[in-house]
Amino acid sequence: GKSTLLSLIPRLHDPPPGTVLLDGVDVREVPLRVLRGAIGMVPQETFLFSDTLAANVALGVPTEQATLGAITAAATVARLDKDVEGFPKGYETAVGERGITLSGGQKQRTAIARAVLTDPRILILDDALSAVDTYTEEEILARLRGVMRERTSLIVSHRISTVRDADLILVLERGRIVERGTHAELVTRDGFYADLHRKQLLEEELAAS
């Protein structure tokens, strides 16, 4: 249900009237082009085209905004810059159909760079870090904090480490919100979230041993 909830914001699914508001305005009353133009969304399934890496990052961005400097800056936030250094043609490296030449993590980071480059008022990350290891995840989140500080950001994840610094965490179980609060509040409450947190800490300890 997490992805379904997020899809209501850009109206990939139409929400019931009066249920999803942006600045107090029903999203159904906002022209679709204006609404989606204000949103940068990284879906679970990243779609890349058979084109250069630069063109994939700059997809949907006006030509004057898609300079190499801007593309590089967005890629740096997404922690894609280190990978590009190893590519034979840098940002002009050809990406195969659906990004077949890239790893799952590289695809996700390309999509994050694409969303960052659009400079959206609302940033939506739908399990966008699931294909990267926890160390890379920490790096990306640290770089994203400056970006997220200036806009509304919604992050979906099954990893506690991804959402622990959020201002508000909503916990879904079987399609329903069962808890809400900050990380510290939810851990103290010792409910579903706290139990999940303990399990993930144990998994990390076992993986490190």
Image (tube, rainbow, N blue to C red):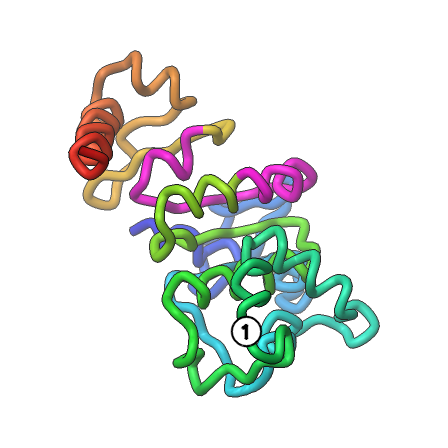
Q: Which quadrant would residue 194 be assigned to in this image?
A: top left
Quadrant holding the C terminus: top left
Q: Nearer the viewer, residue 181 or 78?
A: 78
Q: Is residue 171 left or right of residue 136?
A: left
Camera-nearest residue between 110 and 178: 110
In terms of image quadrants, where is residue 47? bottom left
Which element type, helix, strand or loop, lies under badge 1?
A: loop
Q: Identify which residue is drawn at 50% across, 47% down.
A: 20
Instruction: Write the residue at 51% across / 27% down.
Output: 167
Q: Is residue 187 above or below residue 168?
A: above
- The picture places residue 154, in percent across and down from the top left corner, at 50, 44
> Residue 19: x and y, percent?
47, 45
Which residue extends farthest right?
A: 64
In the picture, measured across the screen, residue 148 lies left or right of residue 3, that is: right
Report whether 15 appears left or right of 85.
Answer: left
Highlighted magenta segment, given as a residue range: 142-164
Circle 1 residue: 87
**Magenta span contains residue 152:** yes
- Location of residue 99 in the rendering, given as x and y in whole percent from the top left corner: 44, 78
- Which amino acid, by three-letter code, is at mark 1? Phe
Q: Would you say residue 4 is visible in this rendering?
A: no
- Camera-side residue of 76 and 89: 89
Is the residue marked by circle 1 packed among few (<14), some (14-19), or many (20+) residues within 10 Å?
few
Residue at position x 48%, y 31% from top?
Answer: 166
Q: Residue at x 45, y 65 (%)?
A: 106
- Residue 56 lies, with reference to residue 208, above or below; the image says below
Asked if residue 75 can be seen in this view, the reply is yes
Residue positioned most to the top: 188
Q: Is residue 33 covered in magenta?
A: no
